[in-house]
Image (tube, grey):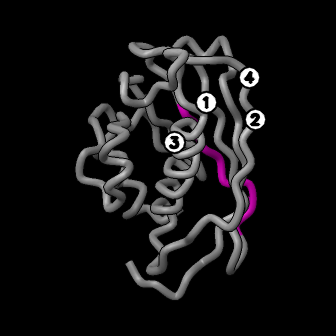
């Protein structure tokens, strides 16, 4: 982890992310909960516009949370280039409903010179129920930040 980048992220602990370079992350409105080696933890409050017709968190929103949280984790390394997801697999285990607060915890499993492999677990607030788990590979792009 790049100390300067990690310190920048730690300054946001306990605060809602509203000024992200990712407009989608700003729409999700996560609260930064923890910054650890190769890992970030976010809390999300489930809003009505995040739900499906059954009143549960939409699977696509869950997948997007996982993808966005993992992308944000790469900020920890302080690299000059963006990474893009080249795949994303999500397993769903339990629903969340409007008004629930859920936790997304990322972990970089392997960081190569071009490809990063990472995962993200999504839990209920009490961390007693695993709601979803996603895995991705990200490719380093030539696009500078």
Q: CA distance from mark 2 to mark 3?
A: 13 Å
The residue that mark 3 highlights is: 65
The residue that mark 4 highlights is: 93
Q: State which region is magenta.
A: 104-111
Quadrant of the frame with the C terminus: bottom left
Give the SS element for disc 1.
Answer: strand
Which dot, 3 or 1, sits closer to the camera?
A: 3
Q: Residue 100: x percent and y percent?
A: 45, 14
Which residue is at the front of the view, 118 or 3? 118
Q: Residue 1: x percent and y percent?
A: 54, 61
Relative height, residue 72 to residue 93 (above, below): below
Q: CA distance from mark 1 to mark 4?
A: 10 Å
Residue at 54% over, 30% down: 58
The residue that mark 2 highlights is: 91
Q: Earlier in the sequence, mark 1 or mark 4?
A: 4
Q: Are marks 2 and 3 in contact (CB under 8 Å)?
A: no
Q: Are marks 4 and 3 in contact (CB under 8 Å)?
A: no
Q: Residues within 10 Å of mark 4 (few under 14, many from 20)?
A: few
Q: Residues within 10 Å of mark 3 (few under 14, many from 20)?
A: many
- Which quadrant of the figure has residue 101? top left
- Which quadrant of the figure has residue 3? bottom left
Confirm whether the magenta stretch covers residue 110.
yes
């Amino acid at each position: 982890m790049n100390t300067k980048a990690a310190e920048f992220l730690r300054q946001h602990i306990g605060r809602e992310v509203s000024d992200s370079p990712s407009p989608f992350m700003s729409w999700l409105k996560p609260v930064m909960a923890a910054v650890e080696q190769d890992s970030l933890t976010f809390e999300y409050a489930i809003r009505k516009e995040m739900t499906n017709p059954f009143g549960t968190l939409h699977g696509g929103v869950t997948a997007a949370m996982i993808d966005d949280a993992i992308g944000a984790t790469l900020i920890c390394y302080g690299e000059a280039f963006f990474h893009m997801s080249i795949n994303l697999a999500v397993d769903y285990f339990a629903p969340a409903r409007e008004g629930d607060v859920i936790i997304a915890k990322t972990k970089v499993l392997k960081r190569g010179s071009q490809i990063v492999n990472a995962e993200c677990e999504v839990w209920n607030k009490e961390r007693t129920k695993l709601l979803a788990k996603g895995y991705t590979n990200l490719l380093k792009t030539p696009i500078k930040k």
